[in-house]
């Protein structure tokens, strides 16, 4: 399956959209704020007239604006400290062509309204949309100072060719055959290497890059802990196979084009490609309960409700997962099964008797500098 045609998050601003259901990833971006600020501060010390950045796999919604505002505020703060006028900023927003760019452009008017002319120490900002796959070239040679990407690079460019069936699974599970796991790792290696190769041409010497992706801290990519969100989806579809609602062959041939890399795999690939030095590499957990508690605290309509963050937690997680994979599931199984699958998904998630510590998304962040 070619991801360029089929992979995109749910568009718009509605209840099922990625925009309304991407708070967990937003919390992840906030955890990497310091790394982004450090990169921007280092770049401002080289006095660029215009700082050109790209957010790769930006999707559409508040996180797109969040990344832009972290960068803009970091530029303003550094220029104030240096006593200099801030550079102008060009922010290139990239995603696959089927992404809902229109929703971003509408939302951007708010930021533009506040900063297009630049106030004292607030940089003037300009935005462009760049549709295309970041596994290929999307910018001219040496045109970028800073590249950011969050929660995108775990998506593979294509479904790897498999020699065996990943029976009863749709992800790398503990019962997945070794050959299936190896094929996913090899596809990730190929994709991540191409990503670095392309960026090495587009980023100027001394330029920075901060990448955050879903990952793992264990040696084996088939550990159930880092794939905690996917087991209930496999179970929901399998239930529908037993009930005759989904064909078994369809289930057997569905695998998520996804790979959770470990920090060690990422550092090995950066070293093998050779164009970047690693400034920082770390993994962190995004706990669902902590995210939900914060979400409820910010929601005025929830003020009089119970303060147990587990109330509604699984419904929110199910919506977040649906917003991310609905187009892929619909493309493979047809749209008719969507409501049923995700209702079952939520129910299974709620009834699971598992270690609650697994209820987290494991993320890996790497901060890189383009060698001179
Ligand atoms: C989960 S969203 C992350 C959005 C946002 N960066 C965030 O942190 O919330 C992943 C995005 O990556 C995009 N994506 C996946 N593969 C891509 C590729 N090869 N080139 C460009 N974008 C890609 C998807 O279309 C999707 O919008």
Image (cartoon, rainbow, N blue to C red):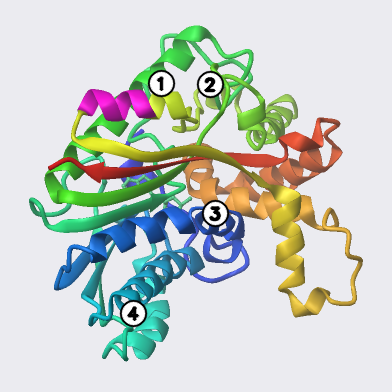
In reply to whether residue 120 is colored magenta, the answer given is no
Q: Which of the 4 image quadrants contains residue 267?
A: top left
* Separation (CA) of disc 3 from disc 1: 26 Å
Q: Nearer the viewer, residue 262 or 156?
A: 262
Residue that carries the numbered disc 4 in the rendered image: 80
Q: Is residue 58 visible?
A: no
Relative vertical location of residue 292 with respect to residue 116 in this rendering, above or below: above
Residue that carries the numbered disc 3 in the rendered image: 31
**Label 2 close to label 1 by CB (< 8 Å):** yes
Q: Nearer the viewer, residue 320 or 291?
A: 291
Q: Answer with mark 4 or mark 2, whichever residue precedes in sequence.
A: 4
- Callout 3 crowding tier (Cα within 10 Å): few <14, some 14–19, many ≥20: some
Residue that carries the numbered disc 1 in the rendered image: 185
Relative vertical location of residue 45 with respect to residue 169 in this rendering, above or below: below
Q: Nearer the viewer, mark 3 or mark 1?
A: 3
- Callout 4 crowding tier (Cα within 10 Å): few <14, some 14–19, many ≥20: some
């Amino acid at each position: 399956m070619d991801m360029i045609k089929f992979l995109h998050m749910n568009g718009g601003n509605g209840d099922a959209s990625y925009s309304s259901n991407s708070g967990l990833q937003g919390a992840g971006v906030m955890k990497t704020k310091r790394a982004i600020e450090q990169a921007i501060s280092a770049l401002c010390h080289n006095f660029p007239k215009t700082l050109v950045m790209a957010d790769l796999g930006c999707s559409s919604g508040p996180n797109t604006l969040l990344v832009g505002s972290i960068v803009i505020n970091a530029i303003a703060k550094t220029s104030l400290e240096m006593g200099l006028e801030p550079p102008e900023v060009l922010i290139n927003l990239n995603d696959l062509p089927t992404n809902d760019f229109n929703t971003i452009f509408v939302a951007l008017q708010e930021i533009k309204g506040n900063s297009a002319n630049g106030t004292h120490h607030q940089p003037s900002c300009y935005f462009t949309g760049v549709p295309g796959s970041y596994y290929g070239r999307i910018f001219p040679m040496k045109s970028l100072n800073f590249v950011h990407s969050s929660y995108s690079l775990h998506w593979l460019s294509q479904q790897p060719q498999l020699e065996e069936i990943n029976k009863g699974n749709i992800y790398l599970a503990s019962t997945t055959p070794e050959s299936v796991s190896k094929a996913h790792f090899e596809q990730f290696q190929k994709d991540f290497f191409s990503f670095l190769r392309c960026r090495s041409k587009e980023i100027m010497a001394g330029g920075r890059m901060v990448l955050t992706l879903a990952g793992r801290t264990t040696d084996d990519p088939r550990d159930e802990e880092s794939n905690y969100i996917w087991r209930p989806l496999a179970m929901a579809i399998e239930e529908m196979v037993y009930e005759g609602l989904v064909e078994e062959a369809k289930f057997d041939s569905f695998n998520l084009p996804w790979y959770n890399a470990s920090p060690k795999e990422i550092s090995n690939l950066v070293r093998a490609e050779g164009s970047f030095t690693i400034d920082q590499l770390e993994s962190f957990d995004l706990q669902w309960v902590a995210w939900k508690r914060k979400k409820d605290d910010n929601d005025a309509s929830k003020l009089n409700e119970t303060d147990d963050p587990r109330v509604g937690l699984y419904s929110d997680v199910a919506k977040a997962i649906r917003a991310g994979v609905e187009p892929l599931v619909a493309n493979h199984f047809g749209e008719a099964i969507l409501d049923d699958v995700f209702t079952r998904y939520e129910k299974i998630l709620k009834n699971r008797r598992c270690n609650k510590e697994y209820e987290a998304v494991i993320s890996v962040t790497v901060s890189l500098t383009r060698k001179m």
